[in-house]
Amino acid sequence: MTAGGMPRRSLIGVTGELFASTVPDGTCEALDDGATILRGFARGQEAALLAEVRAIAASAPFRHLITPGGHRMSVAMTNCGALGWVSDARGYRYESRDPLSGRPWPAMPATFRELARAAARRAGYPPFEPEACLVNRYEPGARLSLHQDRDEEDTTAPIVSVSLGLPATFLWGGLARSDRVRRMRLDSGDVVVWGGRSRHVFHGIAPLADGFHALAGRCRINLTFRRCRRPVPTTSR
Ligand code: SIN
Ligand code: FE2
């Protein structure tokens, strides 16, 4: 993390609008019970992470998945790691192979795994071993409507979410869909970790504003690390 971070970000005002602020890199913002924004935690690694994303997409291309309801998602997705998240007419689930090629998903790069582990640790979680990394690509206008992450059996592990490229507005609600939704700006290099009592909080991404990012171009990339299968039970004596 860089020392002496520059004024570069926005916070939410009492009326909910985004305004410029001066939160430096390395700031740990408590978002909710069990949820933390680690400002700039991946800063300095962005170019290397994006190079890995390009390598992943070369063997498992980005695609617009179809929801069980028949809608084409505006976010394009791919995966790396032992398991990958997919959606089609049959539902949402994790698969060990890319349905497009029938091959296993690309391996999770060591840099990804280490970043996810370090972020979970920094946010106060016990050792985190991600099994799945969903790679989301947002082009201008793409959005992810308010949802809960419910396709994982292991709900004890947190979710680690890394933002790269264009800034986004993260929507953070509550445990009920009707709860008040807060809007938070996420910049390239920011990492959000949520678990514990926040594990099933409704969240999403507002339609991406157009722009150009020096490293990512006209898009935002999000890496979301999860543990999916039930943890191995520890035998107590
Ligand atoms: C997600 O909810 O899976 C992704 C959120 C994001 O793109 O930041
Ligand atoms: Fe999600």
Image: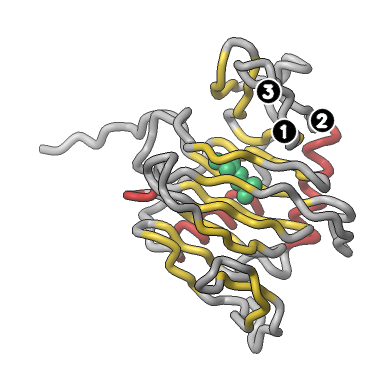
**Figure check: 13 above or below 151:** below
**Residue that numbered label 3 is attached to:** 104
Callout 2, which amino acid? Pro
Image x and y of residue 96, in percent: 60, 22
Callout 3, which amino acid? Pro
Identify the element where label 2 is drawn.
loop
> In percent of the image, x 15 and y 38: which residue is there?
236
Foreground: disc 2 or disc 3 = 2
Q: Residue furthest top?
A: 90
**Residue that numbered label 2 is attached to:** 61
Image x and y of residue 175, in percent: 37, 44
The quarter of the rendered structure image containing the C terminus is top left
Label number found at residue 139:
none
> In percent of the image, x 50 and y 73: which residue is there?
14
**Residue that numbered label 1 is attached to:** 78
Work out whether residue 186 or residue 62 is closer to the camera in this orientation and state it.
186
The quarter of the rendered structure image containing the N terminus is bottom right
In space, the residues marked 2 and 3 are separated at their CA atoms by 13 Å
> In percent of the image, x 72 and y 33: which residue is there?
78
Badge count: 3
First in sequence: mark 1 vs mark 3: 1
Image x and y of residue 40, in percent: 63, 70
Mark 3 residue CB less than 8 A from any atom of ligand 1: no
